[in-house]
Image (cartoon, rainbow, N blue to C red):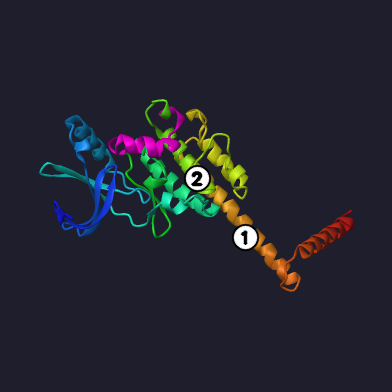
Amino acid sequence: MREAIAHYKVLESLGSGGLGEVYRARDTNLGRTVAVKVLPPAITGDPEHVQSLLDTVARLVGLSHPNIAMLYEAGQEGEQRYLVFEFVQGEPLGTLIRDRPLNVRRVIDFAINLCDGLAEAHAAGLIHGDIRPDTIQITPKDRAKFMNFGLWRFTGGSVRVSDALPYLSPEEQSGAPAGPQSDIYSLGAVMFEMLTGRQRARGLSVRSINPSVPAELEQVVGRMLASNPSSRSGSAAAIAAELRELASILDTRTEASEAASAADAHRFGGQPSRSGRVLLVIVLLAALGAVVFWLF
């Protein structure tokens, strides 16, 4: 294994991806741990391709958000070019799902994280273009974070076709360029998978696979997955606001349910039962009837 890349001391190899070999390294100038991606000849062999990459990097370097892995710089050592990113610990969302749905409340939190990141990027005129479970990292603090933001055009055609197709919007599949609404569609497809443990398939809804998902959340995902871009949710910021409101509603429901269960247990000697709940309802209705009788 190589020992250094420019002033980055290599600590370990992290494997390879669409942007080439990836290393965890120490920035000896700034004293921080980073991820260095050494670009392959497929990217660096064409001068026009390299210039396009450098132009894109120049725009992305200014993008700073807690839910987007930051791109620090593009560098060159001899003939070798590399990109330096924030090092993000954790595991890819795709590894976390493993063909099983995630907890609904957790999915909402992840989706809020990602919508917040998209809102920041879209406001700056930037798009991700390759949103899928393997380009989202879940950190040790259980936050979702975008990886390789805005670099999909440089990650290699095989990665784009084989892995990203289930998450591509209809307009992208038809050859149109990706835009903010395309990112929203792709995130909707990821949310579908988080809630069901399965990639989205035509004719299937979230609740047909996982009935425990609240209808309100299914509606949010459904709007994000609309075939016509103009029919999708207006913006990532609007979706984040809607999800926060839904999270508050679900939390209130949970608190009310827990309070009712606790009251039920206390009322019937600590043994909640269906018959006990029915009796409690009858008592409450009788009390309400008495109140109505005295009022009228």
Quick one: SS at disc 2? helix
Q: Secondary structure at mark 1?
A: helix
Under mark 1, the amino acid is Glu
Determine the residue positioned at 39% across, 32% down. Answer: 179
**Residue 159 is at least partly visible in this image:** yes
**Where 293 sits versus 168, above or below?**
below
Amino acid at dot 2: Glu
Q: Is residue 155 magenta?
A: yes
Residue 102 left/right relative to 19: right
Above-or-below relation of 175 to 40: above
Q: Position of residue 89 (x, y in %)?
A: 34, 57
Say which of 148 and 200 sits in front. 200
Whole-angstrom CA distance, mark 2 to mark 1, is 27 Å
How crowded pointer 2 is (Cα within 10 Å; few <14, some 14-19, many 20+) is rated as: many
Left of 63 or right of it: where is 142? right
Q: Position of residue 293 (x, y in %)?
A: 89, 56
Residues 13 and 72: in front is 13
Residue bearing mark 1: 255
Q: Is residue 70 magenta?
A: no
- Left or right: 24, with 129 as reference point: left
Q: Is residue 123 visible?
A: no
| Magenta-highlighted residues | 151-172
Q: Say which residue appears at 25% left-offset and 44% top-offset.
A: 20
Dot 2 or dot 1: first in sequence order is 2
Residue at x 89% of width, y 53% of height: 296
Main SS, magenta residues: helix
Badge 2 is on which residue? 193
Q: Position of residue 190 (x, y in %)?
A: 47, 43
Residue 83, which numbered label? none
For residue 75, above or below residue 10? above
